[in-house]
Amino acid sequence: MKTIKTTLLLSLLLCFTTYICQAQKMFTVHQDNVKPSMIMEYEAVAKKLLEASKKHNVKTSWTAITTNELKYLYLTPIDNFAALDERPFADMAKAMGDDFGKMFDEFDLCYDSHTDYNITLVEDLSYMEEGAPIIREGENFRKFYYLYFTPANAAKIREGIEAVKALYIAKGSTEYYRIYRSGFGTPEQFYLVVVSAKDEIDSATKSKANDKVLGPDKWDAFSKVINNTSRVQEQSGEIRPDLSYAPKE
């Protein structure tokens, strides 16, 4: 009986994760925590990898982001969890020989730690115009708000985010945001709120104008989120087209 229950549970989990992959946009994130003294060297190697990927037309893609904490993030869209087992650089590594390994040895000198994890775009919690692209031309600046929560508060923080979205809709806010949820590889659970702007000044201007639009009602909605978070982390960042990659068709 125990074996049957275990098999049934695993089958349900597989169905659920397959549904999530199909219903939501998933991304794998590679994060390099670069040493302040090695920024120039790191970017030189990153551009070397980019040029090699173009030359060999590597069948993957990534959007590069740098943050004010000197984290370099590389977001790659994936269709399902099976994509995590793919090795898109295998052919390039074979063609480059020892030079491929040497390139990554150069990367390793630039940071003491790096990691990989998954995030999922939660479209029903995001507040965006219909059909808006994830990267809007001219708006490469980003504000990131990490809302960490415990398993006990998972349902409540989601309800809080829903209340904030309902307020934005009711007030006709023009400050838009996307919501991502943490997945495999993250030591803590979080929702990530991403707000786009042209630059830091544009971001601050939009935020101040939005405060007036939302009015005092915002405190009730926001408190439903904040009261159920274990901590909040704010970062700023920038999309880096010069370090991003997409293969030729």
Image (cartoon, rainbow, N blue to C red):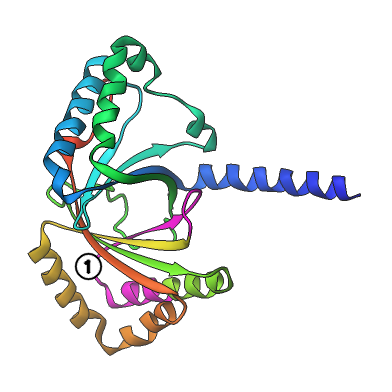
Please identify the residue farthest to the right as the structure is shown.
1
Q: Left or right: 214 with respect to 161?
A: left
- Place of residue 142 in the rendered image (x, y in percent of width and height, measured from the top left): 21, 57
Question: Compared with residue 175, is residue 58 higher up or lower down, i.e. above or below?
Answer: above
Residue at 36% of width from left, 80% of height from top?
222
Q: Does the magenta-highlighted stretch encompass residue 171? A: yes
Secondary element type, mark 1: loop
Residue segment shown in magenta: 163-187
Question: Compared with residue 165, is residue 223 higher up or lower down, i.e. above or below?
Answer: below
Residue at 42% of width from left, 63% of height from top?
191
Q: Left or right: 108 with respect to 207?
A: right
- Total numbered labels placed on residues in the image: 1
Q: Mark 1 points at which residue?
A: 174
Residue at 67% of width from left, 48% of height from top?
13
- Place of residue 48 in the rendered image (x, y in percent of width and height, measured from the top left): 18, 26
Type of amino acid under label 1: Thr
Please identify the residue farthest to the bottom as the structure is shown.
216
User: Along the line of sight, which residue is nearer the eye, 228 or 198?
Assistant: 228
User: Along the line of sight, which residue is nearer the eye, 182 or 165?
Assistant: 182
Residue at 51% of width from left, 30% of height from top?
85
Label 1 crowd (10 A; few <14 / some 14-19 / many >=20): some
- Place of residue 171 in the rendered image (x, y in percent of width and height, measured from the top left): 28, 77
Q: Does the magenta-highlighted stretch encompass residue 31? A: no
User: Along the line of sight, which residue is nearer the eye, 118 or 68?
Assistant: 68
Question: Compared with residue 147, is residue 33 higher up or lower down, i.e. above or below?
Answer: above
